[in-house]
Amino acid sequence: MPHIIDGKAISAQIKEELKEKVTRLKEEGVRICLAVIQVGNDPASSVYVGNKKKACAYIGIESLAYELPEETTQEELLALIGELNGKAEVNGILVQLPLPAHIDEDAVIRAIDPKKDVDGFHPQSVGALCIGQPGFVSCTPAGIIQLLKRSGIEIAGKECVVIGRSNIVGKPMALLLLRENGTVTVTHSKTRNLKEVTRRADILIAAVGRPKMITRDYVKEGAVVIDVGIHRNENNKLCGDVDYEDVAPVCSAITPVPGGVGPMTIAMLMNNCVEAGSKR
Ligand code: GUN
Protein backbone atom coordinates (compact mmCIF):
# COMPACT_ATOMS: atom_id res chain seq x y z
CA MET A 1 0.00 0.00 0.00
CA PRO A 2 1.20 3.56 -0.64
CA HIS A 3 2.51 6.07 1.85
CA ILE A 4 -0.45 8.24 2.86
CA ILE A 5 0.72 11.84 3.01
CA ASP A 6 -0.75 13.24 6.22
CA GLY A 7 -1.56 16.89 5.46
CA LYS A 8 -3.19 17.36 8.84
CA ALA A 9 -0.03 16.35 10.70
CA ILE A 10 2.32 18.33 8.42
CA SER A 11 0.10 21.41 8.68
CA ALA A 12 0.02 21.06 12.49
CA GLN A 13 3.83 20.86 12.53
CA ILE A 14 4.12 24.04 10.41
CA LYS A 15 1.63 25.84 12.66
CA GLU A 16 3.67 24.88 15.74
CA GLU A 17 6.83 26.26 14.11
CA LEU A 18 5.01 29.48 13.26
CA LYS A 19 3.57 29.80 16.77
CA GLU A 20 7.09 29.69 18.21
CA LYS A 21 8.29 32.26 15.67
CA VAL A 22 5.37 34.58 16.46
CA THR A 23 6.10 34.28 20.21
CA ARG A 24 9.74 35.27 19.58
CA LEU A 25 8.66 38.19 17.37
CA LYS A 26 6.27 39.39 20.10
CA GLU A 27 9.16 39.40 22.57
CA GLU A 28 10.98 41.69 20.13
CA GLY A 29 7.92 43.92 20.03
CA VAL A 30 6.72 42.79 16.57
CA ARG A 31 3.01 42.05 16.29
CA ILE A 32 1.44 40.46 13.24
CA CYS A 33 -2.00 41.36 11.98
CA LEU A 34 -4.10 39.98 9.12
CA ALA A 35 -7.17 41.78 7.76
CA VAL A 36 -9.76 39.40 6.34
CA ILE A 37 -12.51 40.82 4.16
CA GLN A 38 -15.64 38.90 3.20
CA VAL A 39 -18.35 40.40 1.00
CA GLY A 40 -21.77 38.76 1.32
CA ASN A 41 -22.42 35.54 3.20
CA ASP A 42 -21.66 32.62 0.94
CA PRO A 43 -21.74 29.69 3.42
CA ALA A 44 -18.54 28.02 2.11
CA SER A 45 -16.67 31.35 2.30
CA SER A 46 -17.91 31.87 5.87
CA VAL A 47 -16.46 28.46 6.85
CA TYR A 48 -13.08 29.26 5.21
CA VAL A 49 -12.93 32.72 6.78
CA GLY A 50 -13.83 31.26 10.19
CA ASN A 51 -11.01 28.70 9.86
CA LYS A 52 -8.52 31.42 8.90
CA LYS A 53 -9.48 33.49 11.95
CA LYS A 54 -9.14 30.42 14.20
CA ALA A 55 -5.69 29.61 12.81
CA CYS A 56 -4.60 33.23 13.41
CA ALA A 57 -5.77 33.06 17.03
CA TYR A 58 -3.95 29.75 17.56
CA ILE A 59 -0.64 31.04 16.19
CA GLY A 60 -0.86 34.43 17.89
CA ILE A 61 -1.61 36.54 14.83
CA GLU A 62 -4.19 39.28 15.32
CA SER A 63 -7.03 39.22 12.84
CA LEU A 64 -9.34 42.03 11.80
CA ALA A 65 -12.58 40.77 10.29
CA TYR A 66 -14.52 42.90 7.81
CA GLU A 67 -17.87 41.30 7.04
CA LEU A 68 -19.42 43.50 4.38
CA PRO A 69 -22.95 43.20 2.98
CA GLU A 70 -23.58 41.67 -0.46
CA GLU A 71 -24.59 45.13 -1.79
CA THR A 72 -21.16 46.64 -1.04
CA THR A 73 -19.98 48.53 -4.13
CA GLN A 74 -16.62 48.02 -5.77
CA GLU A 75 -15.70 51.60 -4.84
CA GLU A 76 -16.44 50.93 -1.16
CA LEU A 77 -14.37 47.75 -1.19
CA LEU A 78 -11.46 49.47 -2.97
CA ALA A 79 -11.64 52.32 -0.44
CA LEU A 80 -11.36 49.83 2.45
CA ILE A 81 -8.38 48.13 0.81
CA GLY A 82 -6.75 51.53 0.30
CA GLU A 83 -7.24 52.30 3.96
CA LEU A 84 -5.75 48.94 5.05
CA ASN A 85 -2.81 49.39 2.66
CA GLY A 86 -2.02 52.60 4.54
CA LYS A 87 -2.19 51.07 8.02
CA ALA A 88 1.29 50.17 9.25
CA GLU A 89 -0.11 47.76 11.86
CA VAL A 90 -1.82 45.62 9.18
CA ASN A 91 0.68 43.19 7.59
CA GLY A 92 -1.60 41.08 5.44
CA ILE A 93 -4.83 41.71 3.52
CA LEU A 94 -7.00 38.85 2.33
CA VAL A 95 -10.19 39.32 0.31
CA GLN A 96 -12.13 36.07 0.34
CA LEU A 97 -13.13 34.91 -3.16
CA PRO A 98 -15.49 34.57 -4.95
CA LEU A 99 -16.80 38.12 -4.79
CA PRO A 100 -20.38 39.06 -5.80
CA ALA A 101 -20.81 39.32 -9.59
CA HIS A 102 -21.01 43.15 -9.62
CA ILE A 103 -17.42 43.43 -8.31
CA ASP A 104 -14.39 43.05 -10.60
CA GLU A 105 -12.16 40.52 -8.82
CA ASP A 106 -9.05 41.45 -10.80
CA ALA A 107 -9.41 45.12 -9.88
CA VAL A 108 -9.74 44.17 -6.21
CA ILE A 109 -6.67 41.91 -6.30
CA ARG A 110 -4.66 44.64 -8.06
CA ALA A 111 -5.63 47.13 -5.34
CA ILE A 112 -3.87 45.16 -2.58
CA ASP A 113 -0.36 46.35 -1.78
CA PRO A 114 1.90 43.48 -3.01
CA LYS A 115 3.79 43.74 0.32
CA LYS A 116 0.52 42.72 2.05
CA ASP A 117 -0.66 40.24 -0.62
CA VAL A 118 -0.57 37.15 1.61
CA ASP A 119 -2.75 35.22 -0.88
CA GLY A 120 -0.09 35.72 -3.57
CA PHE A 121 -2.75 36.61 -6.17
CA HIS A 122 -1.47 40.08 -7.18
CA PRO A 123 0.01 40.21 -10.72
CA GLN A 124 3.29 41.46 -9.20
CA SER A 125 3.47 38.42 -6.90
CA VAL A 126 2.71 36.04 -9.78
CA GLY A 127 5.26 37.80 -12.03
CA ALA A 128 7.92 37.59 -9.30
CA LEU A 129 7.30 33.86 -8.94
CA CYS A 130 7.60 33.47 -12.71
CA ILE A 131 11.04 35.11 -12.90
CA GLY A 132 12.38 33.71 -9.62
CA GLN A 133 12.21 36.87 -7.53
CA PRO A 134 10.99 37.14 -3.95
CA GLY A 135 7.26 37.58 -3.39
CA PHE A 136 4.26 35.87 -1.87
CA VAL A 137 3.27 32.53 -3.36
CA SER A 138 -0.31 31.23 -3.67
CA CYS A 139 -0.99 29.13 -0.57
CA THR A 140 -2.31 25.84 -1.97
CA PRO A 141 0.58 25.16 -4.38
CA ALA A 142 3.11 26.36 -1.78
CA GLY A 143 1.53 23.88 0.64
CA ILE A 144 1.89 21.05 -1.88
CA ILE A 145 5.62 21.75 -2.18
CA GLN A 146 5.84 21.50 1.63
CA LEU A 147 3.91 18.21 1.59
CA LEU A 148 6.37 16.76 -0.91
CA LYS A 149 9.50 18.07 0.81
CA ARG A 150 8.43 17.10 4.31
CA SER A 151 7.54 13.61 3.05
CA GLY A 152 11.06 13.21 1.65
CA ILE A 153 9.88 13.19 -1.97
CA GLU A 154 12.49 14.60 -4.32
CA ILE A 155 11.22 16.91 -7.09
CA ALA A 156 14.46 17.69 -8.99
CA GLY A 157 14.65 15.84 -12.29
CA LYS A 158 11.21 14.24 -11.88
CA GLU A 159 8.45 14.24 -14.48
CA CYS A 160 5.76 16.42 -12.90
CA VAL A 161 2.33 16.64 -14.55
CA VAL A 162 -0.21 19.21 -13.38
CA ILE A 163 -3.83 18.68 -14.45
CA GLY A 164 -5.50 22.10 -14.43
CA ARG A 165 -4.30 25.62 -15.28
CA SER A 166 -6.13 27.92 -12.86
CA ASN A 167 -4.43 31.11 -11.68
CA ILE A 168 -4.72 30.01 -8.04
CA VAL A 169 -3.46 26.41 -8.32
CA GLY A 170 -2.41 25.01 -11.72
CA LYS A 171 -0.20 27.81 -13.02
CA PRO A 172 1.64 28.66 -9.76
CA MET A 173 1.98 24.92 -9.08
CA ALA A 174 3.78 24.47 -12.40
CA LEU A 175 6.09 27.42 -11.66
CA LEU A 176 6.93 26.11 -8.18
CA LEU A 177 7.71 22.60 -9.45
CA LEU A 178 9.91 24.19 -12.11
CA ARG A 179 11.68 26.26 -9.41
CA GLU A 180 12.39 22.93 -7.66
CA ASN A 181 13.94 21.66 -10.91
CA GLY A 182 11.10 19.34 -11.89
CA THR A 183 10.36 18.66 -15.57
CA VAL A 184 6.89 20.13 -15.76
CA THR A 185 3.92 19.53 -18.06
CA VAL A 186 0.64 21.41 -17.62
CA THR A 187 -2.48 19.74 -18.99
CA HIS A 188 -6.02 21.10 -19.33
CA SER A 189 -9.41 20.48 -20.90
CA LYS A 190 -8.01 20.74 -24.46
CA THR A 191 -5.10 18.33 -23.89
CA ARG A 192 -5.18 15.42 -26.32
CA ASN A 193 -4.54 11.90 -25.02
CA LEU A 194 -4.59 13.12 -21.41
CA LYS A 195 -4.06 9.65 -19.97
CA GLU A 196 -0.93 9.17 -22.05
CA VAL A 197 0.51 12.41 -20.68
CA THR A 198 -0.47 11.80 -17.04
CA ARG A 199 0.94 8.26 -17.19
CA ARG A 200 4.39 9.79 -17.72
CA ALA A 201 4.23 11.52 -14.33
CA ASP A 202 6.45 10.62 -11.39
CA ILE A 203 4.53 13.33 -9.52
CA LEU A 204 0.92 13.89 -10.59
CA ILE A 205 -0.99 16.91 -9.31
CA ALA A 206 -4.76 16.69 -9.88
CA ALA A 207 -6.46 20.09 -9.82
CA VAL A 208 -9.23 19.43 -12.31
CA GLY A 209 -12.31 20.21 -10.26
CA ARG A 210 -14.17 17.01 -11.21
CA PRO A 211 -14.99 14.45 -8.53
CA LYS A 212 -13.06 11.16 -8.80
CA MET A 213 -12.09 11.80 -12.43
CA ILE A 214 -8.56 10.46 -11.99
CA THR A 215 -8.72 6.68 -11.97
CA ARG A 216 -5.77 4.25 -12.06
CA ASP A 217 -5.57 4.34 -15.87
CA TYR A 218 -4.23 7.92 -15.57
CA VAL A 219 -1.47 6.89 -13.17
CA LYS A 220 1.92 5.25 -13.66
CA GLU A 221 2.78 2.46 -11.22
CA GLY A 222 4.73 3.95 -8.30
CA ALA A 223 3.79 7.60 -8.97
CA VAL A 224 3.19 10.18 -6.24
CA VAL A 225 -0.39 11.48 -6.50
CA ILE A 226 -1.49 14.81 -5.01
CA ASP A 227 -5.22 15.52 -4.98
CA VAL A 228 -6.23 19.19 -4.85
CA GLY A 229 -9.96 18.63 -5.39
CA ILE A 230 -12.60 18.73 -2.70
CA HIS A 231 -16.21 17.79 -3.48
CA ARG A 232 -19.21 16.27 -1.78
CA ASN A 233 -20.44 13.06 -3.34
CA GLU A 234 -24.04 11.85 -3.60
CA ASN A 235 -23.90 10.62 0.04
CA ASN A 236 -22.62 14.01 1.27
CA LYS A 237 -19.17 12.49 1.85
CA LEU A 238 -16.04 14.45 0.92
CA CYS A 239 -14.03 13.23 -2.07
CA GLY A 240 -11.29 14.59 -4.32
CA ASP A 241 -10.47 14.75 -8.03
CA VAL A 242 -8.80 11.36 -7.59
CA ASP A 243 -10.68 8.08 -7.19
CA TYR A 244 -8.71 7.23 -4.05
CA GLU A 245 -9.75 3.58 -3.67
CA ASP A 246 -8.91 2.86 -7.30
CA VAL A 247 -5.60 4.78 -7.42
CA ALA A 248 -4.05 4.15 -3.98
CA PRO A 249 -3.00 0.53 -4.69
CA VAL A 250 -0.89 1.53 -7.73
CA CYS A 251 0.92 4.62 -6.41
CA SER A 252 3.86 5.05 -4.02
CA ALA A 253 2.36 7.99 -2.10
CA ILE A 254 -0.99 9.76 -2.15
CA THR A 255 -2.84 12.56 -0.35
CA PRO A 256 -6.25 11.70 1.12
CA VAL A 257 -9.34 13.94 0.93
CA PRO A 258 -10.00 15.27 3.50
CA GLY A 259 -6.71 15.59 5.41
CA GLY A 260 -4.28 16.01 2.51
CA VAL A 261 -3.83 19.29 0.63
CA GLY A 262 -6.72 21.12 2.37
CA PRO A 263 -5.09 21.76 5.76
CA MET A 264 -1.90 23.01 4.07
CA THR A 265 -3.55 26.06 2.48
CA ILE A 266 -4.22 27.73 5.83
CA ALA A 267 -0.79 26.75 7.19
CA MET A 268 0.86 28.48 4.23
CA LEU A 269 -1.39 31.53 4.60
CA MET A 270 -0.19 31.79 8.19
CA ASN A 271 3.38 31.38 6.95
CA ASN A 272 2.88 34.26 4.49
CA CYS A 273 1.46 36.45 7.27
CA VAL A 274 4.46 35.76 9.50
CA GLU A 275 6.77 36.54 6.59
CA ALA A 276 4.88 39.79 5.91
CA GLY A 277 5.18 40.75 9.59
CA SER A 278 8.85 39.83 10.00
CA LYS A 279 9.85 41.90 6.95
CA ARG A 280 8.13 45.04 8.18
N1 GUN B 1 -11.49 31.23 -2.06
C1 GUN B 1 -11.16 29.92 -2.17
N2 GUN B 1 -9.84 29.74 -1.87
C2 GUN B 1 -9.35 30.97 -1.57
C3 GUN B 1 -8.06 31.43 -1.17
O1 GUN B 1 -7.09 30.70 -1.04
N3 GUN B 1 -7.97 32.77 -0.93
C4 GUN B 1 -9.02 33.61 -1.08
N4 GUN B 1 -8.82 34.92 -0.84
N5 GUN B 1 -10.22 33.22 -1.45
C5 GUN B 1 -10.38 31.90 -1.68
Image (tube, grey):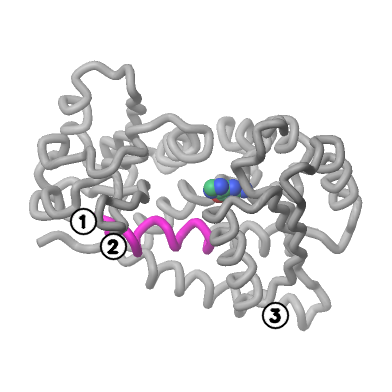
* Residue drawn at 55 percent across, 55 percent down: 43
* Placement of 93 over or under 196, stated as above or below: below
Q: Secondary structure at mark 2?
A: loop
The residue range painted magenta reads: 253-267
* Residue drawn at 89 percent across, 59 percent down: 88
Please state which amino acid type lies under the numbered disc 3. Arg
* Placement of 254 over or under 8, stated as above or below: above
Quarter in which the N terminus is drawn: bottom left
Q: Secondary structure at mark 3?
A: helix
Mark 3 / mark 1, whichever is N-terminal: 3
Q: Which mark is residue 253?
A: 1
The Cα atoms of the two marked residues, 3 and 2, are separated by: 30 Å
Give percent across and percent down for residue 213. 23, 38
The Cα atoms of the two marked residues, 1 and 2, are separated by: 7 Å
Mark 1 / mark 2, whichever is N-terminal: 2
Marks 1 and 3: in contact by CB < 8 Å?
no
Residue 260 is one of the magenta-drawn residues: yes
Query: Which residue, given by chain and number where applicable, does mark 3 sit on?
Result: 24
Please state which amino acid type lies under the numbered disc 1. Ala
Q: Can the viewer see residue 123? A: no
Q: Is residue 41 left or right of residue 206?
A: right
Give percent across and percent down for residue 38. 69, 52
* Placement of 84 over or under 170, stated as above or below: below
Query: Which residue, given by chain and number where applicable, does mark 2 sit on?
Result: 5
* Residue drawn at 43 percent across, 29 percent down: 165
Give percent across and percent down for residue 55. 58, 71
Marks 2 and 1: in contact by CB < 8 Å?
yes
Q: Nearer the viewer, mark 3 or mark 1?
A: 1
